[in-house]
Amino acid sequence: MKIIKDMTITDVPYFKASGVSGGIKKNGNKDLCVIYSEKPSVAAAVFTTNKVKAAPVILDMKHIRSDSIRAIVANSGNANACTGKQGHKDAAAMAALTASLLNIPSDSVLVASTGVIGVPLPMQYVEPAIRNACENISYSGGKDAIQAIMTTDTCEKSVTIEVELGGKKVLLSGIAKGSGMIHPNMATMLGFITTDANITKDMLRKALSESVSKTYNMISVDGDTSTNDMVIILANAAADNKLIESADESFEAFKQALDLLNTELSKKIARDGEGATKLIECTVSNAVSYKDACILAKSVIGSNLTKAAFFGNDANWGRILCALGYSGGNFSTDKVDIFFESKAGCIQLIANGEPLQFCEKTASGIMGEEYVTIKVDLKEGEYSATAWGCDLTYDYVKINGSYRS
């Protein structure tokens, strides 16, 4: 299993894509993409847990039940969320138009939208953009598709993994967007994954669900869970590996590859948090249960006070202990060790729940790197979990203070 550089979703056999500018965004950047599998594909998806769900999410929760999904149409610049009955009609119209242009059933098309909430979708721009995207769909359109789903993202997010399943080389490739409104339990993020693996719908659903729980659901930028989040995976069986229909060795290898892909995309999303200057990773080890490890790691990553301290490179370990304490996770305060680590070095701040003497300058230097790890050793069990986030900066407020304009 390995990460393949300079490849994207359309490098997976029989997948095409496009990304176009249709005028949905005020800045004229690309704002609509279509991803299409020439071969019938099984699909799985995970959607936002927010009770307020955007029209595309509600539509997709119905369409995902289809035996075959052939295409995804996604727009940025408008979330089509909280837009009433018209929003549902517009989401259905996006699927129907894409289907007619690609000559596939309407329920084999999934729809995604991201952007401003509560504003009607400008169909006078969306429909021509869909026509343009379908006319220009190609095997080299993956990069354009990435650009078309970006909102406040400052960088493109794409990862491709190669894994061997039963003697056959299989590719998994994913693109994602996400920078703000990111919090565990599906965070505003979209993720689209293509693979040529031969796998049943049930096993694909199982693999994605398990993977999301320990990747995307373990990132937090600002504590807000969006109305539009979704991760979709399409598998078209072009690799011709033996069908994965049970939790066998091939399934485990596939899931490991999917976990790696989703972990790398999750880290890219967390690092690109709105206004962020660094990626923060928190690993909680030796917890009494996996659930406790997850709760504790996510609490630290989600703490605004901890995030602010990392922005200022201030080794205020009390904020981390505080976040552990109110998390609801089980641990003994008199056993906790806390370390900070980056490429600048590693320093221990807490031993058995008590503060250690340490060099503030050294700690600040470690925190000043672009990728910093908080290591929490509970010394009580054998379970570990990792969560990812970013620092909280002045620019986060600037970006979100004028998001609609």
Image (spheres, helix red, strand yellow):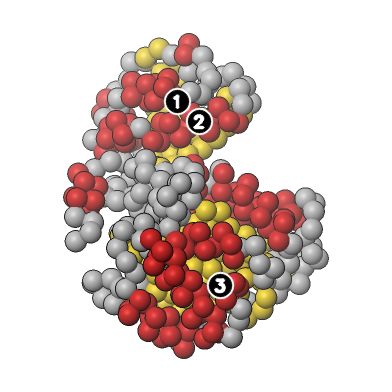
* Contact (Cβ within 8 Å) of mark 1 with mark 3: no
The amino acid type found where label 3 is placed reads Val
| Residue 3 can be seen in this image | no
Give whichever of discs 2 and 3 has the lower sequence position. Answer: 3
| 253 left or right of 28 in image | right
Marks 2,1: beta carbons within 8 A: yes
Q: Which residue is mark 3?
A: 109
The label number, if any, that marks residue 258 in the structure image: none
Give the crowd class for mark 2: few <14, some 14-19, many >=20 residues within 10 Å: some
Question: Can residue 315 be seen from the camera position used here?
Answer: yes
- In the image, residue 163 lies at what x, y percent? 67, 61
Q: Nearer the viewer, mark 2 or mark 3?
A: 3
Q: Nearer the viewer, residue 403 or 295?
A: 403
Residue 102: percent from left, percent from top = 55, 84
Q: Secondary structure at mark 3?
A: strand
Amino acid type of the residue tagged 1 in the rendering: Ser
Residue under pointer 2: 295
Query: Could you say whether the residue bearing mark 1 is in a helix, strand or loop?
Result: loop
Where disc 2 sits, the SS reads helix
Q: How many marks?
A: 3
